[in-house]
Each structure stands twice: as structure tokens, then as C-alpha cells.
Amino acid sequence: MVSRVVFGRGSFNQLGDIIAPKRQNIKAPFIFLVDDVFKGNSWLTSRIPIAYNDQLLYISADEEPKTSQVDELVEQIILSHKDRPSGIIGIGGGTILDLAKAVSILLTNKGEAKNYQGWDLVKSPAIYHVGIPTISGTGAEVSRTTVLTGPQKKLGINSDHTPFDQVILDPELAKDVPKEQWFYTGMDCYIHCIESLNGTYLNAFSQSYGEKAYQLCLEIFTEDNLSVEDSQDKLMMASWHGGMSIAYSQVGVAHAMSYGLSYLLGTKHGIGNCVVFDHLEEFYPDGVKLFKQMKQKHNIELPQGLCSNLGDDEFDIMIDVALSLEPLWINAVGKNWKQIITRDKLKSLYQKM
Ligand code: NAD
Ligand code: ZN
């Protein structure tokens, strides 16, 4: 679990005080990985407490993180500074938070990021790392994984060294998120709840967090009387609880199939989950019904025909990626999932998207 967290509008201003005691010496910098959407946005960047040899790197979130990108960032940091950094601070959405987690791990663990994709392969503790979400929903701020696309697979570095040492939850940072993106990333949280609460892995720990996150999502996405601030505050906490819920259970069909879309077509996580979930009535009837209502209420048009021009080889790639995620299928369908989830079944679902 994340060891320290602060919450509150304006809490971003505490960043300098929070990290100061963690500075190893004046030559050991803090490296700030910041979503490049904030380039030129002095409202946020003027409050980043840069001192001594600290470095700010703007990173695009247009594409999801790759293992090669992690390796390049680690090399860049090592070559630019004689001393090992005092810490890595990620400021952005799931893309930047995952990069910050992965870079902090690879600074203390030899070799390439792709070697650590899997479960509990990280041997040495990461360097001090801080996560500051600027958009809510993925739960990446709280989870024990960092999802990376590697040469062979899209898979997380799941380990006890992955979670942030410190998280700052300042809902005000999400004030300029575009509406569509707000919906897609918010729905990632909603889908985490549905998949966790309807899964065979469910237990009291996951249920307690999943139910709370689900209830918050209902307030945010179905009610009319929430203020903008309330809605931002609640979505930030829904994301946290949704992340905690899947930490002790698993996600399900939407995530497995969305990983296939992402691997082949580069479809981003939030929107990919929405595209898939829209067609999953047979697995999650109530969840999908409500999803369609929320989509309509917020005038969201999902992209259509993503798979309409794909050949058999391409369907096979997506199906292979989806089927490789065995725990997700066991959670979603049960131990006999292979009898139900055939290649033909997945192909016919992908063909609808
Ligand atoms: P994102 O980080 O990809 O960002 C989406 C878009 O929103 C980008 O264009 C970004 O620039 C923009 N944005 C972010 N904050 C903004 C702000 N305050 N104002 C204006 N624009 C802003 O989005 P995401 O949905 O948070 O993250 C998706 C990533 O998270 C994927 O790579 C996915 O694999 C990963 N993920 C990780 C976990 C985990 O547990 N580690 C869980 C779910 C998803
Ligand atoms: Zn997700």
C-alpha cells in the first residue's frame, strides 16, 4: 500500500515541504516527470518546488508508457546526474504515474524494464517516488502495478516496490480535464468496480472498497446536483477506492479485451475499456445498462468500427493478448473459463467494436 497520502484542494502546495526531508544531498536531484499538457501552464508549474540540480522533464501522454521509454528515461537521468536521484515525482494521469513508478524501480534494479513485467520480479526497493494525479479514475496512484507495453506483451510490473511512497491528492489539479477524457478515465474506475464486484476473486476487503467507489461513481455520473468541486473531490476518492478494490481482486472481461485493442491499435486504456464494455451485456448486464445511461446523459459518442478493417492475423494478435490474461478470465468467468471464452467468441465480440 501507499505509505503516506495527503488530500485536499490546494494540497499540491505542500509538495516542497513534503519532499525536502527526502533530499539525500544537494547533488542528488528530484526528477519531476510532468505531463506536457501542463507546459506553459504557470498555475501548476510555478508551484513545482525545483531547487539545486532538480530536473523537470515534460512527457507526452499521447501514447501509453512503453518499456523502451522507461529504459530511455532511466538512461537520460543516469547520464545527466552524477548522484542517484533523491526521488521521482510524477505529475499527471495514469500514463505519467506509471512512468514515474517504473523509472523509480529501474533506477535501482539492473537491466531493462521488460525483464520486470510480471509478478514480484523486482528485487531491490525503488527510489523514493511520489505520485500526484491530475485526472481521476485509473487508480494508478494507489495500485501495486505499473502497466507497460513491451516488445512481447502489455503487462504490469506488479511488486511490493511499485506503490508510491507518497501520494498527493489535490482534486483542484483536475479542473481543466476535457469532458470526454473525464468520462473515459472516470469510467475506468466504474469498470474496475463492476469487474471487481462481479468477479470470483471478490472478498470482503475488495468489496468494501469496490462498493464505496461504485456508490461515488453513481453520485458523480448520474446525479444532477453535485457542484463541480464536489464532483472532482469524489472522483478522486472513487479512483482511490476502485484501485484498492482491484488490488485484492482482479479486473475482468473489459480489461482483458481492451488490452488487446491497446496492443494492436494503440487504443488508450480509458476509451478502450468504454468501447469494449459497451458490448458486454451478457457478462455484466446491470453494469452495462447503467453505463449506456451515463454515456447518454453526458452526450458521449464512442468511436465505432475500430476493428472493421482488420484481417484475421490482426484479430489473432488481439485474441492472443486477451487470452494470455488468465487471472482476469478466472475472475470474470470462473475456473472453467476456457470452455466459455473461445477464440470465436472473442472474435465475434471484437467484430462489433
Ligand atoms: P492519461 O494519463 O493517458 O491522460 C489522458 C489525457 O488527459 C492526456 O491527453 C493528458 O495529457 C490529459 N490530462 C491529464 N491531466 C489533465 C489535466 N489536469 N488537464 C487537462 N488534461 C489532462 O490518462 P489516464 O486515463 O489517467 O491513464 C491511462 C493510463 O493509465 C494507461 O497507460 C493505463 O495503462 C494506465 N493505467 C494504470 C493502472 C495502474 O494501476 N497502474 C490502472 C489503470 C490504468
Ligand atoms: Zn483500468
Image (spheres, grey):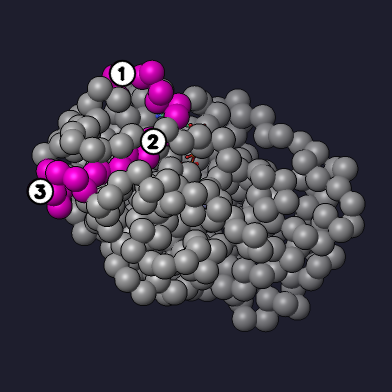
Q: In this view, does 234 lie to the left or right of 334?
A: left
Q: What residue type is labelled 3?
A: Pro
Q: In which quarter of the image is the N terminus?
A: bottom left
Picture quadrant where residue 325 is located: bottom right
Task: Return the residue at label 3.
Answer: 21
Q: Name the residue under label 2.
A: 57
**Vertical relation: 159 (above or below) 299:** below
Q: Of the residues under marks 3 and 1, which one precedes in the sequence?
A: 3
Query: In the rendered structure, which amino acid carries the disc numbered 2?
Result: Leu
Q: Is mark 2 on a helix, strand or loop?
A: strand
What's the distance in space between the residues labelled 1 and 2, CA to CA? 15 Å
Q: Does the magenta stretch include residue 36?
A: yes
Q: Which residue is drawn at 56% across and 45% down?
A: 64
Q: How would you rate the neighbour count of disc 2 (Cα within 10 Å): few for under 14, some for 14-19, many for 20 or more?
A: some
- Residue drawn at x 66%, y 70% is 324
Stretch in magenta = 20-44
Residue count near mark 3 (Cα–Cα under 10 Å), binned few <14, some 14–19, many ≥20? few
Image coords of residue 251 (percent x, y) = 53, 62
Residue that extends furthest to the bottom in the rendered view of this protein = 336
- Residue at 77% in and 41% down: 306
**At which x and y percent is residue 48?**
24, 30
**Which mark is first along the chain, 2 or 1?**
1
Using the numbered discs, state the Cα–Cα distance from disc 2 to disc 3 in whole angstroms. 22 Å
Q: Name the residue under label 1.
A: 42
Pointer 2 or 3: first along the chain: 3
Residue type (three-letter) at the residue carrying disc 1 = Ser
CA gap between label 3 and label 1 equals 25 Å
